[in-house]
Image: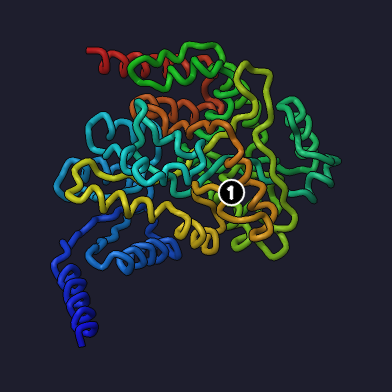
Amino acid sequence: MRKMLSVLMLMFFLLSCFAFAEQVNLKFLHRWTQEPDKSFFDGVARAYEKEHPNVKIDVQAVANDAYKEKIKVMLGTEDAPDVFFTWPGEFTNRFIRAGRVLDITNYMLKDGSLFDYVGSQVIPFLYNGALYGLPYRVDGKIFVYNKEIFKKAGIDNPPATFDEFLVDLDKLSKLGIKPIAFGNSEPWAVSHYIAAINQKSVPEEIWEKDLDPAFGMWTDPGYVEALRIYSELVPYFNDYSNALKHDQTKVAFYQGLNAMAYIEIVEIPTIATDAPEGFFDKIGVFPFPATNGPGDQHYLVGYPEGFVVSANSKHPEEATDFLKFLTGKQTGISELKTFGYFNGIKNMISPEEVQPIVYETAKLVMDSDKMVNWLDSSLHAKIWAVYSVELQKLTDQVTTPEKAMEAVIEAAKKVREEFNQ
């Protein structure tokens, strides 16, 4: 009887704790409005709620292009989300400088969860020595090519150097095709090319300094050389690149109208689902070929996408805990099964659990000592606004590398003056 009474008292105590636990309401904002992504994030929120009954998560989604403007407005209002998607680099850094993003360093060190993540994928979320976010999925940029077309052109192995690349492009052109599928109606696409070539053409300490809007000069001759290298590729792109979307040109690549496309690693799994049957077995991959420039030739262009916590969240501890769940191993395994891409957790699976090419390309990211950010995300918005226009003009062959960089240098000068008033 006494034992039963003790059990009843314990149950009453636990029920009381549950009944009076503070109700926590979190707003969670991401940029995936289409299926299956939208339902995936809804499922992640519901899974967290199940483990934390006192937490309710309001999941909201805004489409990619609109998101960039929407989040700027929302962070200055009471409607700001507690946890929200972001691109690391200058896109996020401006919010950090404005005091809109929470420093989560102590939260991550307190339970040691920081060390569950791949170091190179956490580095992009550091700012002035503090951690402000976590990687949701890792990514990098690679050329994916049609092995059958390469073989038909007499190319046995993908190029390792840019000079070899130009030779191969000539061989492919003789087949009567435009070798590279490229859609640049949204100029983030060309930013990935220039990020890769700038990094190879300019000493690292210089381009890293130039990315800081308060100090960037953009006067190193390597930037003009990078645009010259890019210009050499333009004749090998499909016609009307600036009028076509990236996804449209991928379809042309799947149909064999082009020999290769420069795509993100996270796009590799979609080839298996979107391309004609058997096409996935025909493809190979290679990174952007090495140039003769002074930059490190072994870095990979691409940054993780991730999430951060609002500095104005009324529930920073719960919001950070949800952030860790969102980017952790349990969710990461679900991502891999659902979409075929990796998050930033170490040693999540073994190679035999995924298709070889998926593991190969993800490993390029995981093994990289350093990633080079997408140019459109790393630049100050006013500099990118000019740079992107000049790059589209260069793609249309209506300007020169020298004139393009003159415009960028002038834009950088104006931004510097704003920062140093």
Which x, y percent locates residue 274?
A: 59, 61
Determine the residue positioned at 47% across, 11% down.
219
Front residue of 394 and 229:
229
Query: Furthest-bottom residue in view?
Result: 1
Asked if residue 85 lies left or right of residue 252, the reply is left
Asked if residue 35 lies left or right of residue 368, the reply is left
Query: Furthest-front residue in view?
Result: 2
Determine the residue positioned at 38% across, 49% down.
64
Which x, y percent locates residue 77?
A: 15, 44
User: Can I make out residue 239 in this image?
Assistant: no
Label 1, secondary structure: give it.
helix
At label 1, which amino acid type do we have? Thr
Q: Identify the image quadrant of residue 161.
A: top right
Front residue of 216 and 231:
216
Q: Quadrant of the C terminus?
A: top left
Q: Compared with residue 177, is residue 325 higher up or lower down, i.e. above or below? A: below
Front residue of 31 and 262:
31
Q: Identify the image quadrant of residue 409.
A: top left
The residue singled out by tag 1 in the image is: 249
Asked if residue 398 lies left or right of residue 322, the reply is right
Q: Quadrant of the N terminus?
A: bottom left
Determine the residue positioned at 58% across, 42% down.
366
Q: Compared with residue 224, is residue 369 higher up or lower down, i.e. above or below? A: below
Which x, y percent locates residue 336?
A: 54, 59
Front residue of 228 and 159:
159
Q: Compared with residue 348, is residue 35 higher up or lower down, i.e. above or below? A: below
Q: Compared with residue 198, is residue 24 higher up or lower down, i.e. above or below? A: below
User: Can I make out residue 372 in this image?
Assistant: yes
Question: Crowdedness of circle 1 by 10 Å Cα count: few (<14), some, many (20+)?
Answer: many
Question: Number of callouts in the render?
Answer: 1
Which x, y percent locates residue 25?
A: 20, 59
